[in-house]
Image (spheres, helix red, strand yellow):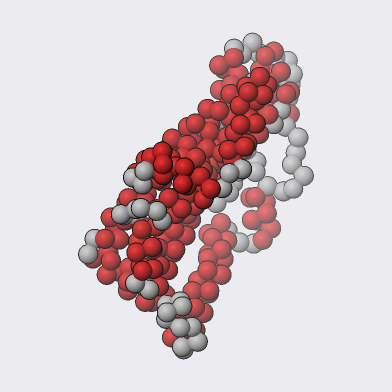
């Protein structure tokens, strides 16, 4: 994937200094130097990052098998895995998982697109900020549960209600971080682009967008977590499928193993989504000293 470097194609004639050297050095060492000093490679650090979760699951299993934790309160991990296998064989788990993933993906695409568009508009225009930002911040302050009755009146309890809540939750982190990223672009880089006679479109593509990408991608990571939070709220009301429905249906029959399974799946999906976002950071920000060497 092609990386975006705001200084890759900009240099003043006769300056005698490569563009990258014009950037101030970071106060803290780069991730690659920190990894070298620790004496561990990226895969060693990856293994260490999983030690605590694996140890926690092992302790959980031991305590559950020893009878110190009641199965009605918290079933053993092995019991949860057995339940997952049975639900996978009869097809219900894959159906609920696919339904939730589809809702989250559609809601994320809609909300992310709206948040990015509004954030870009506000980031470039003080007039747009005056007209839009206060209303956006007021809506952002309203909890999901407070909006849920009104959303049900608007959309009923079908798919539209769930996608709307996901889109609403996703839009705000991307909006805020897009505005922040655009406003934090170094004015010297913008001036350099103007000296090089870059037009507005080229200025945005070569200078402003690459400079704002770290903040925008941070917003994407926050939005991914918010998407699942909104989806859990949406799927607890009137849903006939999905992970939220699976957990709520299990509650009626005191199936704590199914409830824990749904929670674990939410956690695993969140980790996978965050890993995808981090991969985007490494790919799109390979030129950046604080992102390019991350694993």
Q: Quadrant of residue 49?
A: bottom right
Q: Nearer the viewer, residue 145 or 59?
A: 145
Q: Position of residue 133 (x, y in %)?
A: 63, 30
Q: Nearer the viewer, residue 168 or 191?
A: 168
Q: Residue at x 58, y 58 (%)?
A: 41
Q: Is residue 170 above or below residue 9?
A: below
Q: Position of residue 84 (x, y in %)?
A: 33, 68
Q: Residue at x 59, y 12 (%)?
A: 199
Q: Is residue 162 above or below residue 186?
A: below
Q: Position of residue 31 (x, y in %)?
A: 65, 50
Q: Quadrant of residue 254?
A: bottom left
Q: Residue at x 23, y 65 (%)?
A: 89
Q: Residue at x 26, y 60 (%)?
A: 92
Q: Indicate left or right for 263 with 3 as reference.
A: left
Q: Position of residue 235 (x, y in %)?
A: 40, 53
Q: Indicate left or right for 189 with 164 as reference.
A: right
Q: Is residue 11 above or below residue 252?
A: above
């Amino acid at each position: 994937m092609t990386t975006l470097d705001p200084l890759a194609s900009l240099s003043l004639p006769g300056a005698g200094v490569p563009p990258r050297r014009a950037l101030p050095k970071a106060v803290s060492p780069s991730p690659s130097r920190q990894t070298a000093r620790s004496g561990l490679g990226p895969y060693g650090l990856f293994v260490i990052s999983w030690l605590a979760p694996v140890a926690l699951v092992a302790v959980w299993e031991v305590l559950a098998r020893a009878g110190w934790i009641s199965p009605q309160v918290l079933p053993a991990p092995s019991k949860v895995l057995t339940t997952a296998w049975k639900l996978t064989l009869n097809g219900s788990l894959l159906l609920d998982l696919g339904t939730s993933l589809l809702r989250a993906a559609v809601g994320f695409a809609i909300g992310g697109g709206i948040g990015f568009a509004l954030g870009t508009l506000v980031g470039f225009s003080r007039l747009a900020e005056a007209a839009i930002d206060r209303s956006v911040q007021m809506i952002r302050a309203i909890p999901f549960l407070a909006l849920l009755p009104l959303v049900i009146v608007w959309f009923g309890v079908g798919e539209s209600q769930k996608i709307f809540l996901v889109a609403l939750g996703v839009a705000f982190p991307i909006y805020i971080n897009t505005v922040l990223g655009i406003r934090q672009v170094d004015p010297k880089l913008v001036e350099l682009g103007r000296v090089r006679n870059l037009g507005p479109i080229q200025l945005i593509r070569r200078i402003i967008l690459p400079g704002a990408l770290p903040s925008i991608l941070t917003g994407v990571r926050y939005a991914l977590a918010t998407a699942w939070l909104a989806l859990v709220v949406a799927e607890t009301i009137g849903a006939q499928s999905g992970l939220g429905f699976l957990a709520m249906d299990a509650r009626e029959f005191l199936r704590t193993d199914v409830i824990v399974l749904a929670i674990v799946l939410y956690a695993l999906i969140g980790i996978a989504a965050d890993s995808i976002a981090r991969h985007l950071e490494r790919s799109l920000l390979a030129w950046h000293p604080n992102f390019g060497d991350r694993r």
